[in-house]
Image (spheres, rainbow, N blue to C red):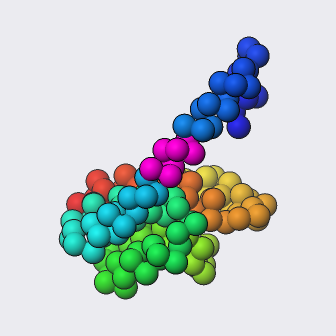
Amino acid sequence: MHRHLLEETVNEGDVEQELRWVREAHEAVRRRIPDFLATLALNRDPSTQVAVAELVAQFPEDVQEVRPHVLRLVEAGGEDPRRLILELALAALGSDVEPEELLQRLPNEYYEAEGIEELRAEFAESEDERVQYREILRSVLGAAIADR
Protein backbone atom coordinates (compact mmCIF):
# COMPACT_ATOMS: atom_id res chain seq x y z
CA MET A 1 0.00 0.00 0.00
CA HIS A 2 2.74 2.48 0.92
CA ARG A 3 5.56 0.89 -1.08
CA HIS A 4 5.95 4.01 -3.20
CA LEU A 5 7.12 5.85 -0.06
CA LEU A 6 10.04 3.51 0.47
CA GLU A 7 13.35 4.18 -1.20
CA GLU A 8 14.82 0.73 -0.61
CA THR A 9 13.70 -2.59 -1.99
CA VAL A 10 10.84 -4.17 -0.11
CA ASN A 11 11.09 -7.79 0.94
CA GLU A 12 7.84 -9.39 -0.24
CA GLY A 13 8.03 -11.95 2.58
CA ASP A 14 8.10 -9.14 5.14
CA VAL A 15 5.15 -7.45 3.46
CA GLU A 16 3.14 -10.68 3.50
CA GLN A 17 3.96 -11.21 7.18
CA GLU A 18 2.85 -7.68 8.06
CA LEU A 19 -0.36 -8.09 6.06
CA ARG A 20 -1.02 -11.35 7.90
CA TRP A 21 -0.57 -9.52 11.22
CA VAL A 22 -3.01 -6.82 10.12
CA ARG A 23 -5.61 -9.42 9.10
CA GLU A 24 -5.15 -11.28 12.39
CA ALA A 25 -5.50 -8.07 14.42
CA HIS A 26 -8.61 -7.12 12.43
CA GLU A 27 -10.19 -10.49 13.14
CA ALA A 28 -9.22 -10.39 16.83
CA VAL A 29 -10.99 -7.05 17.25
CA ARG A 30 -13.91 -8.21 15.11
CA ARG A 31 -14.50 -11.20 17.40
CA ARG A 32 -15.04 -8.71 20.24
CA ILE A 33 -17.78 -6.73 18.45
CA PRO A 34 -20.51 -8.27 20.66
CA ASP A 35 -18.63 -6.95 23.70
CA PHE A 36 -18.33 -3.50 22.15
CA LEU A 37 -22.04 -3.47 21.30
CA ALA A 38 -22.84 -4.43 24.90
CA THR A 39 -20.76 -1.42 25.98
CA LEU A 40 -22.83 0.79 23.67
CA ALA A 41 -26.01 -0.53 25.24
CA LEU A 42 -24.89 -0.15 28.84
CA ASN A 43 -22.52 2.80 28.95
CA ARG A 44 -24.10 6.26 28.99
CA ASP A 45 -20.81 8.16 28.80
CA PRO A 46 -20.94 10.15 25.52
CA SER A 47 -17.18 9.88 24.93
CA THR A 48 -17.29 6.12 25.32
CA GLN A 49 -20.28 5.91 23.02
CA VAL A 50 -18.67 7.87 20.19
CA ALA A 51 -15.36 6.01 20.56
CA VAL A 52 -17.10 2.63 20.39
CA ALA A 53 -19.32 3.80 17.49
CA GLU A 54 -16.19 4.83 15.58
CA LEU A 55 -14.59 1.47 16.32
CA VAL A 56 -17.52 -0.66 15.16
CA ALA A 57 -17.91 1.50 12.04
CA GLN A 58 -14.55 0.08 10.91
CA PHE A 59 -16.27 -3.27 10.32
CA PRO A 60 -18.73 -2.79 7.46
CA GLU A 61 -18.84 -6.56 7.04
CA ASP A 62 -20.85 -6.63 10.29
CA VAL A 63 -23.26 -3.87 9.32
CA GLN A 64 -26.42 -5.89 10.05
CA GLU A 65 -25.33 -6.48 13.61
CA VAL A 66 -23.79 -3.06 14.26
CA ARG A 67 -26.07 -0.52 12.55
CA PRO A 68 -29.10 -0.87 14.88
CA HIS A 69 -26.93 -0.08 17.91
CA VAL A 70 -25.46 3.06 16.39
CA LEU A 71 -28.85 4.12 15.01
CA ARG A 72 -30.34 3.84 18.51
CA LEU A 73 -27.76 6.36 19.77
CA VAL A 74 -28.52 8.77 16.92
CA GLU A 75 -32.25 8.51 17.56
CA ALA A 76 -31.67 9.17 21.27
CA GLY A 77 -30.66 12.68 20.29
CA GLY A 78 -27.78 14.83 21.30
CA GLU A 79 -25.92 17.76 19.89
CA ASP A 80 -22.97 18.11 17.56
CA PRO A 81 -20.20 17.09 17.60
CA ARG A 82 -21.38 13.84 19.25
CA ARG A 83 -24.37 13.50 16.94
CA LEU A 84 -22.21 14.22 13.89
CA ILE A 85 -19.79 11.44 14.86
CA LEU A 86 -22.65 8.98 15.28
CA GLU A 87 -24.13 9.98 11.92
CA LEU A 88 -20.71 9.60 10.27
CA ALA A 89 -20.47 6.13 11.83
CA LEU A 90 -23.83 5.25 10.26
CA ALA A 91 -22.63 6.59 6.90
CA ALA A 92 -19.43 4.54 7.22
CA LEU A 93 -21.65 1.51 7.69
CA GLY A 94 -23.50 2.30 4.46
CA SER A 95 -26.59 4.11 5.72
CA ASP A 96 -28.20 6.52 3.30
CA VAL A 97 -27.12 10.03 4.28
CA GLU A 98 -26.87 13.43 2.67
CA PRO A 99 -23.10 13.99 2.29
CA GLU A 100 -23.36 17.77 1.90
CA GLU A 101 -25.29 18.14 5.15
CA LEU A 102 -22.61 16.19 7.02
CA LEU A 103 -19.75 18.06 5.32
CA GLN A 104 -21.25 21.40 6.35
CA ARG A 105 -21.27 20.30 9.99
CA LEU A 106 -17.63 19.20 10.16
CA PRO A 107 -15.72 21.13 12.83
CA ASN A 108 -13.74 24.07 11.40
CA GLU A 109 -10.70 23.15 13.47
CA TYR A 110 -10.51 19.90 11.51
CA TYR A 111 -11.64 20.95 8.04
CA GLU A 112 -11.46 24.47 6.68
CA ALA A 113 -13.22 25.47 3.44
CA GLU A 114 -10.40 24.12 1.26
CA GLY A 115 -10.51 20.78 3.07
CA ILE A 116 -14.27 20.53 2.55
CA GLU A 117 -13.77 21.12 -1.18
CA GLU A 118 -11.18 18.34 -1.26
CA LEU A 119 -13.64 16.02 0.47
CA ARG A 120 -16.33 16.88 -2.09
CA ALA A 121 -13.91 15.96 -4.88
CA GLU A 122 -13.02 12.69 -3.14
CA PHE A 123 -16.70 11.81 -2.77
CA ALA A 124 -17.29 12.58 -6.47
CA GLU A 125 -14.50 10.18 -7.46
CA SER A 126 -15.20 7.51 -4.86
CA GLU A 127 -16.42 4.05 -5.74
CA ASP A 128 -17.29 3.41 -2.09
CA GLU A 129 -18.25 6.44 0.01
CA ARG A 130 -18.03 4.35 3.18
CA VAL A 131 -14.24 4.56 2.94
CA GLN A 132 -14.35 8.38 2.89
CA TYR A 133 -16.74 8.45 5.82
CA ARG A 134 -14.44 6.18 7.85
CA GLU A 135 -11.50 8.50 7.12
CA ILE A 136 -13.50 11.59 8.15
CA LEU A 137 -14.72 9.78 11.24
CA ARG A 138 -11.17 8.97 12.35
CA SER A 139 -10.17 12.59 11.76
CA VAL A 140 -12.93 14.27 13.78
CA LEU A 141 -13.51 11.76 16.57
CA GLY A 142 -11.43 13.86 18.97
CA ALA A 143 -13.87 16.76 18.63
CA ALA A 144 -16.68 14.73 20.19
CA ILE A 145 -14.53 13.26 22.92
CA ALA A 146 -13.02 16.62 23.86
CA ASP A 147 -16.39 18.41 23.75
CA ARG A 148 -17.70 17.14 27.05
In the picture provided, is 27 more to the left or to the right than 13?
left
Q: Residue furthest bottom?
A: 75
Quadrant of the image occupied by residue 140? bottom left
Assess whether residue 51 is covered by the magenta stretch: no
Q: Quadrant of the C terminus?
A: bottom left
In the picture provided, is 126 more to the left or to the right than 38?
right
- Residue found at x 30% / y 56%: 145
Q: In this rendered view, identify the residue nearer to me: 42 or 104.
A: 42
- Residue found at x 43% / y 58%: 31
Residue 110 image point, x, y percent: 48, 51
Is residue 18 in sight in this rendering?
yes
Above/below status of 85 relative to 98 = above
Majority secondary structure of magenta residues: helix
Q: In this rendered view, identify the residue nearer to me: 147 or 40.
A: 40
Q: In this rendered view, identify the residue nearer to me: 16 or 118.
A: 16
Residue 85 image point, x, y percent: 43, 66
Is residue 91 in sight in this rendering?
no
Residue 44 image point, x, y percent: 21, 71
Above/below status of 135 relative to 64 = above
Q: Residue furthest top?
A: 8
Q: Quadrant of the N terminus?
A: top right
- Residue found at x 51% / y 49%: 26
Q: In this rendered view, identify the residue nearer to me: 30 or 69.
A: 30
Residue 96 image point, x, y percent: 60, 81
Which region is colored magenta?
22-28
Above/below status of 66 relative to 68 = above
In the picture provided, is 136 more to the left or to the right than 83?
right
Count the labels in the image: 0
- Residue found at x 34% / y 63%: 36
